[in-house]
Image (cartoon, helix red, strand yellow):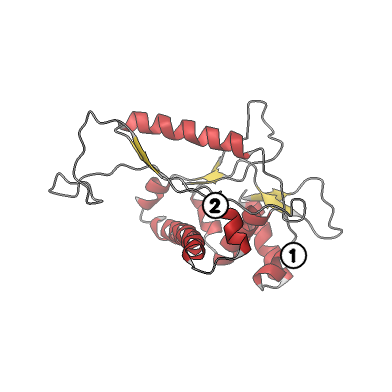
Amino acid sequence: MTESDRDENPTTPSGPPPAMLIDARALRGLAHPLRGRLLDELTLNGPATATILGKRLGESSGSTSYHLRQLSRFGFIEAAPGRSGGRERWWRPRPGGWSMRGHEFLGDPETRPVVETVLGRYYQQREARFRGWTARVWDPVQSAEVRRWKDAASDMVSRARMTPEESREFGRALTEFVGVYMARYQGRTPESHPDTENVELQTTLFPNLPAAGTGTPSGGAPPRDPAEGATGDD
């Protein structure tokens, strides 16, 4: 699992900086619910100060300031360059984002509870954002904002038969492409680009393994012909 927020001006000559691989200590540092909310807010709406974030989230600036420092301590955020907030520091997500060995942490009894907390929150919020968008699209009374965006949004499922090695290669290539392309738009904020909205790309890559004791994939579809090629559904 990777959360990435790449810099508008990559620091590496070959492209965006690599994601930070976090350890168990940093993972525990992210488990606090307010820290997760602060990181989400910075990712969605760009650089901000503790005071700005406190007002948005209904928290005191003292509380947000403390938890922002903890996020910085573990490497998830950093001071935003080129911004002066007087006595307050402007923060932004770490360029390149972060990643973790989720399967490894889940297999360790000591780290399993905290990774379940972090991943559970991540997937719940991810699903909630998508459901929120689809609910607005399906509403018979659509706002002008929804009408403006509905034809720009997309939802696609693609399938192909691969080996684990081919799947890893495909995943790396896809991640690199998305990172390079998204770097064009990073660094924007609602204030600097008022005509934009935060656009979210959700990707998952996983095998449809047969359910235990059957030859049918767990999703319920019958096994496909091995010779069948990739398909895409809009």
Observer-nearest residue: 43 or 150?
A: 150
Observer-nearest residue: 185 or 43?
A: 185
| Three-letter amino acid code at the position of disc 1 | Ile
Observer-nearest residue: 132 or 112?
A: 132
Q: Which residue is mark 2?
A: 26
- Residue found at the very far right of the displayed protein: 86
- On-image quarter of the C terminus: top left
Q: Residues within 10 Å of mark 2 (few under 14, many from 20)?
A: some
Q: Which residue is mark 1?
A: 52
Seen at 49% across and 67% down, the residue is 139
- Residue found at the very far front of the displayed protein: 140
Q: Is residue 35 visible?
A: no
Q: How many marks?
A: 2
* Residue 25 x %, y %: 52, 52
* Residue 150 x %, y %: 54, 54
Q: Is residue 217 visible?
A: yes
| Three-letter amino acid code at the position of disc 2 | Ala
CA–CA distance in space, label 1 to label 2: 25 Å
Q: Tag 2's secondary structure? A: helix
In the rendered view, tell whether residue 80 sits above or below residue 48.
above
Q: Earlier in the sequence, mark 1 or mark 2?
A: 2
